[in-house]
Image (cartoon, rainbow, N blue to C red):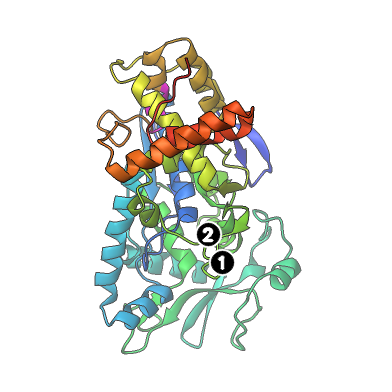
Amino acid sequence: MSLALYNTLSRKKEPFTPLDAERVTMYVCGPTVYNRVHIGNARPVVVFDILYRLLQSLYPNVQYARNITDIDDKIMTAAAEVGEDISILSQRYAQAYFEDMAALNNLEPTIVPYATQHIPEMISMIERLISKGHAYEAKDNVLFAVQSMDGYGSLSGRSLDDMLAGARVEVAAYKRYAGDFILWKPSSDSEPGWESPWGKGRPGWHIECSAMIEKHLGETIDIHGGGQDLIFPHHENELAQSCCAVPDGGFANVWLHNEMLQVEGKKMSKSLGNFFTVRDLLDRGVPGEVIRLVFLSTHYGKPMDWTQKKADDAMATLRKWHKLVKNARPAALDGAVLSHLANDLNTPGALSRMPELAKAGDADAVLAAGQFLGLLAADADWWQPKQASDNAKVRIEALLTSRSQAKAYRDFAKADRVRAQLEAAGIEVVDK
């Protein structure tokens, strides 16, 4: 089975050929841990979890690293607001992140590097960049000189002028060029910092991932992934640093990015009241695999719209599948499901095969496909009917009456909507 992926760097779908078929490497940018992650942050985790599962089915050894950024100005601000040490706050939210991602049935990466545990590697890489003429010290800062690299901007497809016009750039007199970015910044006595050749300070954001990738995965890796919002400046700057620190390496052969998420057709925003975290949904009673199925129903390369209707439909669908596979046994993965996934992670295509398998009564195949996609876990029990309260019984009877009336007036669209509400509540409607 051949695998093809869309490569952001080449701007086309390409056959995937690993550097070493005995050790496939993938790195995905993880969270900056200063708060609970919102559902937009969760989408890349699910996307690359599917890719991780697929790679594991094709290759004997897959090294998947997803980092934790536990030193950042946002973390420092959040810790100061609650009067807490940043190490305590960051560890608490890192643990919350692990719990929330596990609730979506994501596998754990093979490597979870923390930024603060790799300061020596970052300092070493910065020293190499200075020695090669790609970085310079100014006012206790160390900056990367973007004009020193031929081809800077190749990942995002932007010229230097375009980057300055379309990005928020810190204006500083000590910069040789306005687009130069921070590799190391000074820390005051009250701020966290580490000793370095340039005094007490802390790393810039971009250098973290470059140093951790080199240490754990190598100078050149197979796949680097993340959300589309990271292409510029984060991934562009990672690429520049690593290629300049290791001129003979390519850093990453495939760059894979998922599109962004919106809610009910609008950009997620606290001011619009449509901003919520994964934990918010879980606490409202939305099962993790329902969230996952909604994510997988849209191809990773397309913008995704989270809606209540999609969540209700996903819940009803999963109830049906869980009932079907209740006594099923794991089987070999259906070839059509695998083919869809191997074609640039076509998860909607893979999901479209499951109703066909269900219609054919092949519960074993439905179970195998579902579990490969991180669905239909054997220990899931949320879908099973529970004793209804008196209030719930009244509501159900009202819905059944409403549906009967709609059918009597031949308003079949309304009847279908009510039926979907009932099924989302775990009520199976059988017409006789």
Residue 105 point in image, percent of width and height: 35, 40
- The reply to whether discs 1 and 2 touch (Cβ–Cβ < 8 Å) is no
User: Which kind of residue does numbered mark 1 sit on?
Assistant: Leu
Q: Tell me: residue 285, above or below residue 123.
A: above
Residue 314 appears in the rendering: no
Along the line of sight, which residue is nearer the eye, 313 or 378?
Answer: 313
Residue 298 point in image, percent of width and height: 57, 39
Residue 343 shown left or right of residue 120 in the figure: right
As for residue 156 lying within the magenta part, the answer is no
User: Which kind of residue does numbered mark 2 sit on?
Assistant: Glu
Residue at the spot 53% in from the left edge and 62% down from the top edge: 241
* Magenta stretch, main secondary structure class: helix
Q: Tell me: residue 309, above or below residue 125.
A: above
Mark 1 to mark 2: distance in Å?
A: 34 Å
Secondary element at tag 1: loop
Along the line of sight, which residue is nearer the eye, 19 or 406?
Answer: 406
Q: Which residue position holds label 2?
A: 238
Residue 104 shown left or right of residue 236 in the figure: left
Residue 289 point in image, percent of width and height: 38, 38
Q: Give the range drawn in magenta.
A: 369-374
Residue 285 shown left or right of residue 154 in the figure: left
Foreground label between 1 and 2: 1
Mark positioned earlier in the residue sequence (1 or 2): 2
Q: Residue 375 carries which label?
A: none
> Which class describes the residues within 10 Å of circle 2: few (<14), some (14-19), or many (20+)?
many
Q: Which residue position holds label 1?
A: 272
* Quarter where residue 156 is shown: bottom right
Along the line of sight, which residue is nearer the eye, 41 or 256?
Answer: 41
